[in-house]
Amino acid sequence: MYEFFFVLIPRYFPFLLEGAVVTLELSFLSMAFGLVLGMGVALGRLSGRKWLEWPLAAYVEIWRDVPLIVQLLVIYFTLPSIGLTLPAFWAGVLGLGLNLAAYLSEVFRAAILSIDPGQRAAGLSIGMSRLMIFYRITLPLALRIAIPTVGGYFIALLKDSSLVSFISVNELLRNGTIVISNTFRNMEVYMMVAIIYFVMSFVASVLVRHIEQRLTPRHLRRKQRSGKALTARPAVMP
Amino acid sequence: MSARILTTEAPAPGVPTAETVPAKPLLQVRALHKSFGAVNVLRGVDLTVNPGEVSFVIGPSGGGKSTLIRCINFLETPNAGEIMFDGRLLCREEGNVFKVEPERILRAARSEMPMVFQHFNLFSHRTVLENVIEGPVMVKRWPRDEAIAHAEKLLAEVGLADKADRYPDELSGGQKQRVAIARALAMRPKLILFDEPTSALDPELVSGILDTIRALAEQGMTLIIVSHEMGFARRLADVVHFIADGTIVESGPPARIFDNPDNPRLATFIRSILH
């Protein structure tokens, strides 16, 4: 116990935190990439252009049907053989982002399709352009629908980013295994790693809920909050 | 609802109608065709609307009423024919080729003939005030404070001054429709299209909307109204167009259409609806 608190933590915790910072960088960059690409793919598939629909649908299907770890290994180890060598970190961002975008495109597509076409008609009927209707009406409405799901994907991403330790990115989990190979204290170190992941995910979920609230018009907030309390705390059986 | 609703450079009250002065038509539709797949919804519709005129479009459901007014502002793109609005051809036949003006021109035209929908179609993520200023600020590029001042005046005139900060789903159907009318008026339109404006309302809310529309008509606004409110059409219309099977079967002043229908189809329709 003494050794854990006064030797292990001071010596290795900063190293683990460095890894956590890399985990956050990976997550935010892949998220940004995934959001932009996912929205692009969704819009492409909704544009009604046949030559776009087929390849985009194939991309979404393939990337959702192959394990993420395999995608990462392919990007990192086989792209160099066709002359495309990426540093491990960026291979990780590319792999995580491409995978996330495949899922997010479906979330965005469903959200956009769920919007009443009357909203668009109303925009057109006062002379708004299609682009204006998109960013003034369709996008805010779709985001409001998609945000909880997107937030869930972000939290999953924070944790799934640990997979890039397989392609030698020095993020939280990999730094943890490095510490273990030096100290052979796997229980304590994995515990620290787990706690750091938990804190990051927990903060992220609080943040997501905050954003969700901000995007909800104020007259609906109370309703939604009480609804949440109901799902979060099921009635206790007597 | 007797307040003046048009606060802008609208035609003066008591605008000359088609009978007194041969005004230049505000809207002229010729031989308009529209089909959805194999279904021919409009098969050559001709329609003329003069400034200040209140036109009702009536007819059995499926006859093409809504499609007609959705083609007039190009929410639906027609397949053939000609639409002239405010001296500008929006679509035409050249030889055998049907040509539609570019989107930029259509947008400008739409902003001068906004539509009031059956299901209101208020922007659900925006407050009442934001709904009304969206067009003036985003489309007409008016300064925001000017647009807000104008919107507040319009909302007061439709009796909703105290609802400016509410969201659409906090309002009753009648209130929503009055916001939609204010949103249309905020564009300082030349023509307002009404697509069954009272069909989705509870019966006790209908008369409020009809009063608001009547106030617009009395102040000289040009209106095209698709409606099933026959009593209302009889009292307010300058011209009634009866449309069935994709063509205008008969047009005329309400007295002739309702009391002396010579066309048998029209007579049957009037009987069925006034029974």
Image (cartoon, coloured by chain):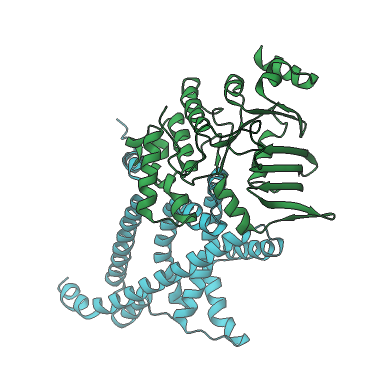
Chain colours: A cyan, B green
Task: Give the residue displayed 85% in from the left and 54% down from the top.
Answer: B96
Determine whether, in the image, residue A183 is placed left or right of residue B169: left
User: Residue placed at 48% from the left, 41% from the top?
Assistant: B185
Residue B144: x %, y % from top left: 37, 54
Q: Please tell me which residue is depicted at 59% across the width and 19% down the height of the picture.
A: B231
Q: Residue furthest front?
A: B21
Q: Which image quadrant is residue B176 in?
A: top left
Q: Quadrant of residue B190?
A: top right
Quadrant where the N terminus of chain B sits is top left
Would residue B21 appear left or right of B200 to someone viewing this image?
A: right
Name the quadrant containing residue A80: bottom right
Is A28 rendered above or below residue B234? below
Q: Would residue B125 be seen by someone viewing this image from the given angle?
A: no
Q: In the displayed structure, would residue B3 be above or below residue A227?
A: above
User: Farthest residue in the top direction?
Assistant: B275
Q: Nearer the viewer, residue B82 or A53?
A: B82
Q: Position of residue A203 (x, y in %)?
A: 30, 60
Would residue B211 be found to the left or right of residue B264 on screen? left
* Percent coordinates x, y for residue A192 in the rendering: 27, 69
